[in-house]
Image (tube, helix red, strand yellow):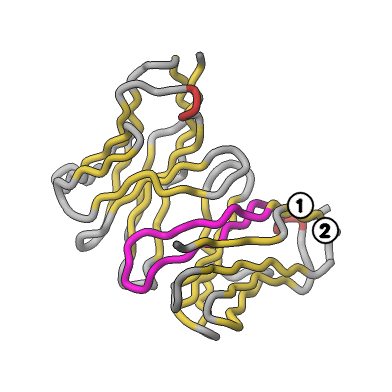
């Protein structure tokens, strides 16, 4: 079946450090891939997406590349800020089931000044 | 532009009481609609989704039900709440044929 696996958290970094949050997926066909971010007490916001192999999604300094050969969609940022502290979710799209999203378990990021 | 509203924002209810959470979407028509629950921790569980008025698909057997009485209105209900129904409830919508889902601000439900 379809699934998404993210690295365990919490991840604690100092401000301006490099961030990588690993995400791998299992899917039939060619799903779209997403990263969502959830700030404390809020709903999820779409951070970036990629719809086909080798696509790079980017937003607010975050990037992720759709790697079909390794079934991965790792999230990276070159220099994190305290304001990036949040929970990050990787997800894929099930087009043939009402567009349902399959989410990873989420990775909490804490950035210290 | 499109917006999604959920209310109430927070709710404290006794065990055995009824529940009604409402979600409405503005600025689009015929969206797909979704209800998720986020229990203790961070994982998201899809509860229901709807591709049209009166069309509801349930993902997990549970104490909850959903209805879609209007195109852009999605309601989550229960006749008798359980302690295990506590959590953060998120509504989301998607353009028909689109990729991503757009989430509302959520409702924090505490069952005592």
**Chain letter for the residue marked with disc 2 in the picture:** B
Q: Nearer the viewer, residue B35 or A105?
A: B35
Residue positioned most to the bottom: B54
* Label 2 element class: strand
What residue appears at the point 33 percent right and 46 percent down from the top-left corner? A48
Q: Which residue is mark 1?
A: B110
Query: Taking B98 as reference, is B71 above or below it?
Result: below
Direction from residue A45 to residue B79 in the image, left or right:
right
Q: Earlier in the sequence, mark 1 or mark 2?
A: 2
Place residue B102 in its image quadrant.
bottom left
Q: Position of residue B37 (x, y in %)?
A: 59, 57
Pointer 1 with pointer 2, Cβ within 8 A: yes
Question: What residue span does the magenta drawing correspond to?
Answer: B86-107
Q: Which residue is mark 2?
A: B13
Place residue B99 in its image quadrant.
bottom left
What residue appears at the point 62 percent right and 49 percent down from the top-left corner? B39
Q: Position of residue B9 (x, y in %)?
A: 70, 54
Direction from residue B52 to residue A1 in the image, left or right:
left
Label 1: how many residues lie within 10 Å, few (<14), some (14-19) or many (20+)? some
* Label 1 element class: strand
Place residue A58 in its image quadrant.
top left
Whether residue A29 is in magenta: the answer is no
What residue appears at the point 33 percent right and 55 percent down from the top-left corner? A92
**Real-space Cα distance between discs 1 and 2?**
6 Å
The numbered dot on residue A62 is none
């Amino acid at each position: 079946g379809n699934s998404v696996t993210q690295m365990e958290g919490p991840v604690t970094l100092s401000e301006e450090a490099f961030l990588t949050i690993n995400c791998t997926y299992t899917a039939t066909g060619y799903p779209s891939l997403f990263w969502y971010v959830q700030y404390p007490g809020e709903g999820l916001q779409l951070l970036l997406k990629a719809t086909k192999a080798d696509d790079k999604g980017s937003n607010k300094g975050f990037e992720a590349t759709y790697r079909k050969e390794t079934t991965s969609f790792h999230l990276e940022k070159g220099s994190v800020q305290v304001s990036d502290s949040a929970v990050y979710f990787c997800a894929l799209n099930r087009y043939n089931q009402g567009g349902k999203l399959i989410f990873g378990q989420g990775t909490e990021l804490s950035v210290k000044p | 532009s499109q917006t999604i509203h959920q209310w109430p924002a927070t709710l404290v209810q006794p065990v055995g009481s009824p529940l009604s959470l409402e979600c409405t979407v503005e600025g689009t028509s015929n969206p797909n609609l979704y209800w998720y629950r986020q229990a203790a921790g961070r994982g998201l569980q899809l509860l229901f989704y709807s591709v049209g008025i009166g069309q509801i698909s349930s993902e997990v057997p549970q104490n909850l039900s959903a209805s879609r009485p209007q195109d852009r209105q999605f309601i989550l209900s229960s006749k008798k709440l359980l302690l295990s129904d506590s959590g953060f409830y998120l509504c989301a919508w998607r353009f028909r044929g689109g990729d991503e889902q757009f989430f509302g601000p959520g409702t924090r439900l505490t069952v005592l």
